[in-house]
Image (cartoon, rainbow, N blue to C red):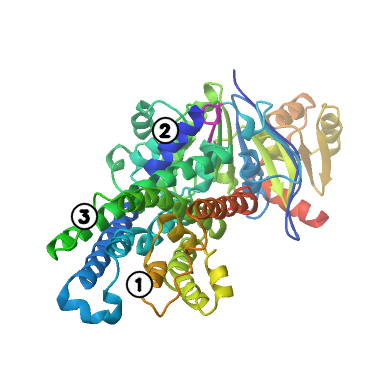
Amino acid sequence: MSALLAQVRAESMKFRLGRMWWAVPAILVLSVAVFAAMTAAIFTMPSLSFLLGDAGLIPGQTVTGLVYSMATAVGYVVPLLLGALLVTSEYRHGTLPTTFAVQPRRGIVLAAKTIVVIGVGVVVGALGVATAVVVGAVVFAGAGADPMLGEWSTWRIVLATLVVMPIWAVIGLALGVLVRNQAAAIVIALAFTQFVEPLLRTLAWASEETAMIGAYLPGSLADAVVGTGLLSGMGSVGPGVTGIASMVVSPGIALLLLVAYAAVLLVLGERLRWRADVTS
Amino acid sequence: MASDVAVHGLQKRFGAATALADVSFTAQPGRVTGLLGPNGSGKTTTLRILLGLTKADAGTALVGGTSYRDLASPTRTVGAVLEPRFHAAASARNHLRIAATAAQLPLQRVQEVIDLVGLSDAADRAIGGYSLGMRQRLALATALLGDPEVLILDEPINGLDPAGILWIRQLLRYQASIGKTVVLSSHVLSEVEHTVDDVAVLRLGRVAYSGPLGQLRGAAMVRVEASDLDRLEQALRKVAGAAVERDGEALCVRGMDAEAVGAAALEAKVALRHLSSEQSGVEEAFLKLMDAQGVQA
């Protein structure tokens, strides 16, 4: 147990080497601030309502939900990247032999990295959701709309963000263990979150059957846990889009499935890569 | 209590290539053991197996009778110098603090080993700007953190300047003199000739020679010419352990040094015309060993 705690301390020190550990979360805060402010403005400022057409008349809770969930909706790439970096940087800098020489029980090292990225996920989630809520609430209040800060629906989003972001971080860690190459892991994380998954989720809306499949993509599950999200929330915004995509899975089941994604990937990485001979 | 290193019957294949066919050697406390051989002979693979980084297909590699992964306190038992690679953005102090933290070693050791390897001035600079020699020193500092009983060093002399080579030689000799077991690998015998007591020479994944360095050198020969060669030959053949060979007008004597041959000639009352010692250096013996094995392989 003390060996694990010591390794956790060492891994958190490693996490803070270089610039990535603050630069990547800084990008999260900036992008969430911009997206939250824009979305809040579009739905509440009369001068911008032409952008929405018929969709302008929607319940306030849907709008605040959309804005306050911006951290998980657009920012989940950040814990994914940070999780991956904690292991790919070992391969990139060739430090894994030293890491394993110091702690030859590799399970302890992987467990420590998992614990550290969970913590990173919680902190990043807190930063992201705080940014979304603060920026969103300021814009709502400025436009004379109710920021709904006293509502359970708002605080549910805050809590769910703190739960979902650590899971993304563990998925990122598992991705790093499986891929090993840092550049490749970053490309996969960016391509999946920014292009592949949004595209698949959008395409899945084509029919009810494909929508059922799309609902089990990790991003859809994350939205289901949070209760809303940019892509799934759109369904309830525009009457032209069916809102069934993510909400067919209950939050509890979605959380379990998301954890299962992370666990399966991590176990796979441990079996296929982490145990293998270290050659560089 | 000092721990020895015992490698027995190691075998390892990488795909179709055999890295280790059959490697056995031991390294004793109080002695520096050199694992020698050309590139690709299996030195690094052997050390990686010893450190639990690579799994052997067969055989055992034990430190003090225990495999590395099962050591209760690995860093206090074994200090390892591997390829000197570090996070480029870390400073030496950062790197050592992280290692000391993970290994549950007192943090005051960090400054001690920084001073010990002579990195005090550079300790807070990013390792990305270090020379290879400085990174070698940092790798050695990492190995020394736990003041281990056994030092295992893979090519520790690589990248060191002459002063650095002298320094590491003295440091390793000192570690052995206080009873530690030191194992180091090198592909250049002359670099470690004055550092090692014992050698294990690897070639094509097999041990070509294992034992004291002096015995590797034992092939030295004395060439002697005399007016009465037959009488000298008779006298020398009576000496125990001497091997005498006729080479035209001269005798080639092995197993005796020049002084002993001279003394034998004096006793036999034979006047010498020529007496020379053809000292084949260890490097030569080493290369001969490589060639001899090459013929077999």
Lateral position of residue A42 relative to residue B37, left or right: left
Residue type of the residue flagged with mark 1: Val
The one of B230 and B278 positioned closer to us in this rendering = B278
Neighbours of disc 2 within 10 Å: few (<14), some (14-19), many (20+): many
Chain letter of the residue carrying label 1: A
Lateral position of residue A194 relative to residue B206, left or right: left
- Residue A209, percent across and down? 59, 74
Q: Do labels 1 and 2 share a chain?
A: no
- Residue A175, percent across and down? 52, 58
The one of B130 and A74 positioned closer to us in this rendering = A74
The one of B171 and A280 positioned closer to us in this rendering = A280
In the rendered image, which residue does mark 3 sit on?
A134
The one of A40 and B208 positioned closer to us in this rendering = A40
Residue type of the residue flagged with mark 2: Thr
Neighbours of disc 3 within 10 Å: few (<14), some (14-19), many (20+): some
Residue B101: mark: 2
Alpha carbon separation for disc pair 3 and 1: 23 Å
Alpha carbon separation for disc pair 1 and 2: 52 Å
Q: In which quarter of the image is the N terminus of chain B?
A: top right
Residue B27: mark: none
Q: What residue appears at the point 69 percent right and 44 percent down from the top-left corner? A: B201
Tell me the magenta residue range.
B73-81
Lateral position of residue B53 relative to residue A114, left or right: right
Residue type of the residue flagged with mark 3: Val
Chain letter of the residue carrying label 2: B
Q: Do the residues labelled 3 and 2 touch (CB within 8 Å)?
A: no
Q: What residue appears at the point 84 percent right and 35 percent down from the top-left corner? A: B233
Circle 2: element type:
helix
- Residue B108, percent across and down? 35, 26
Q: In this rendering, is residue B80 above or below A26?
A: above
In the rendered image, which residue does mark 1 sit on?
A237
Chain letter of the residue carrying label 3: A
